[in-house]
Amino acid sequence: MTTSPTLPSGLHPLVAGGASAFITTTLYQPLDFLKTQIQEPKDGIAKRSTLSITRYTIREYSILRLWRGLTPSLFRAVPGGALYFHSLSLLKENIPKSQQTVLVNGICGALARCAADLVVFPFTLIKARLESSRYTTMNMLTVSQYVYSTCGLKGFYTGFLPTLARDLPFSGIYYMSYRKLKDTVADEVKSSNQYWLTSQASISVAAGLIASLITQPADVIKTYRQVAPADYQNVHITIKSILKTQGLNGFARGFFLRALRRTLVAATAWTLYEYLLKQ
C-alpha cells in the first residue's frame, strides 16, 4: 500500500482487513441489533416484527439505540477482520497457485476464520447480550462482570461450538465461492477498471447469499445459547426446544436481516480490502 511506504508488505492485509472491518461494522450494526432481537428466545417476550422493534427502539430510546452493541462489535470485528485477512494471506502465500483449488480455498477460508474466532469470541458473547432485549440495563462492563461472576472465564465462550459451526462453513463456502466467481469473470474485467467495482460487489453479494443460506440454523442456535444459556444449556437442548416450539421455521428466524447484513458486509469489506491492497 503506497499510503504507508514504511509498512512491511506482509502487514498490508492486516491493516486493510482491520480498516474494512471498522467501516462495515459501524455501518451495518443496526441490522445485527435487529437480527438478535428477532432471533432471541421468546419465553416471556412478545413476538415482534422487524418494523415494530425498530419503531419501539426509536420511540423509547433514540435512533442511536440501534447501534447498541457497537463497542464490543468493533473489539471483535477490527482485530478479527485484520487477523482473518492476514491469516488468509499467509495461507495462500504458502500454497502454489496451481494447487489453489476450490476445496483448498474453502479450507483456507475456514482456517483463517477459526483463528480469528478463537481470539475475539468473548466480544461476540458480550455483543449478543447487549443487543438482546433481556439485558437492556447492562453495559459492556456489567455484562462482563455478570458473565465472569456466574460462569468464570469459560462463560465468555458460551455458544462457541455453534459459532464455529456457523463461521467455519460460512467463511469456507464464502471464500470458495468468492474465488470461483472472481476467477470466472476475471477475463472480462482485467483489461479495464470500468466494471471492477460492480463485479467485485456482485461477486461478494452472491458468495455471501450462498454461505448465509447454508449456515443460518447454526446462527439461530448460537443466539439462543449466548442470550439465554441457563435455559439452553447445550446445542442438543437448544435444537429440541426450537423444533418443539417453532418447528423448522424457527431456524429461519432473522434470515433476511442476517443475509442482508452479511452480504452488505461481505461486499463492502472485500471491495474495500481489494481496493486498499491495490493502492
Image: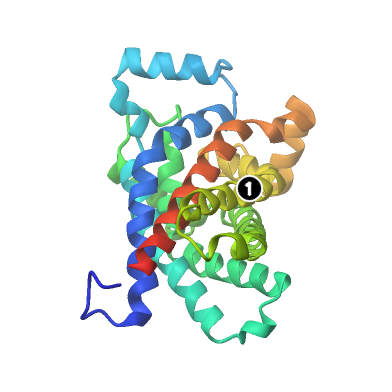
Q: Residues within 10 Å of mark 1 (few under 14, many from 20)?
A: some
Quarter of the figure with the C terminus = bottom left
Residue occupying the far front of the picture: 191
| Drawn side of residue 17 relative to residue 249, left or right | left
Residue closer to the observer: 115 or 41 = 115
Residue in the image at 47% along x and 19% along y: 53
Q: Is residue 233 visible?
A: no
Reading the image, the residue beneath label 1 is: 206
Q: Tell me residue 270's x, y (percent).
A: 47, 57
Residue in the image at 54% along x and 44% along y: 262
User: Does residue 14 lie above or below 136 as drawn?
Assistant: below
Residue in the image at 60% along x and 85% along y: 95
Q: Tell me residue 186's x, y (percent).
A: 60, 64
User: Does residue 12 lie above or below 122 as drawn?
Assistant: below
Residue closer to the observer: 231 or 277 = 277
Q: Tell me residue 123's x, y (percent).
A: 40, 52
Residue in the image at 51% along x and 48% along y: 198
Residue closer to the observer: 239 or 181 = 181
Quarter of the figure with the N terminus = bottom left
Q: Tell me residue 257's x, y (percent).
A: 55, 33
